[in-house]
Amino acid sequence: MAGAPRPPSELEQNIRFLLSFDGNSDGSVTRDELEAALRRQFDGADTNHDGRFDVAEMQAENDRRFRAAGTGASPLIDWNRNNQIEFDEFASTARSMFAEMDKDMDGKLDMDELRLPRQGQGPAAAAGPGQERRR
Ligand SMILES: [Ca+2]
Ligand SMILES: [Ca+2]
Ligand SMILES: [Ca+2]
């Protein structure tokens, strides 16, 4: 062991993030799975169920993400700066990441498209970003 462990690359983080949407755990993520999972997450964090996040809900969700994923977390960003997050804003990061990774543009990220660039460097990542860690 020489020095600090290599921090996960951005690509690696993106892949882990996208795999957290794999609802049926078959190793591939369809556009439908992505939308369904995003919708569930959104509804779960929209505590007053008005279809958008206000600043408090946004902060609560970002805190939750940070606790779950640490520095690999992708916080919500209020793109249009109206102090609330609509579902489209909530979904935009994951959607654009999905589009970027879907090289053959068939609306599905299969195992080839979600493969980590360098495999076989010892035991990789026990816990993905989708899993809460228990202490
Ligand atoms: Ca799947
Ligand atoms: Ca709300
Ligand atoms: Ca594809």
Image (cartoon, rainbow, N blue to C red):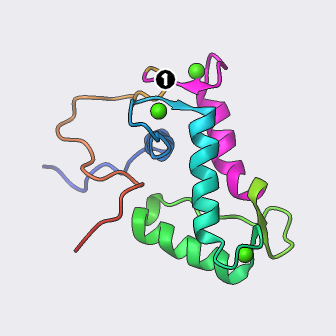
Q: Classify residue 83 as left or right of residue 101.
A: right
Q: Quadrant of residue 70?
A: bottom left
Vertical arrangement, residue 45 with respect to residue 18, above or below = below
Position in image of residue 54 (x %, y %):
74, 78
Query: Cβ of disc 1 within 8 Å of ligand 3?
Result: yes
User: Disc 1 marks which residue?
Assistant: 110
Assess whether residue 93 is covered by the magenta stretch: yes
> Could you tell me which residue is drawn at 64 percent across and 54 percent down?
39
Vertical arrangement, residue 77 with respect to residue 22, above or below = below
> Could you tell me which residue is drawn at 67 percent across and 83 percent down?
56
> Could you tell me which residue is drawn at 39 percent across and 30 percent down?
26
Quadrant where the C terminus sits is bottom left
Hey, which residue is sitting farthest left in the picture?
Answer: 1
Ligand 2: quadrant of the figure: bottom right
Specify the segment rendered in magenta.
89-111
Position in image of residue 129 (x %, y %):
41, 55
User: Could you say which is closer to the camera, residue 50 or residue 60?
Assistant: 50
Amino acid at the residue labelled 1: Asp
> Could you tell me which residue is drawn at 43 percent across and 23 percent down?
111
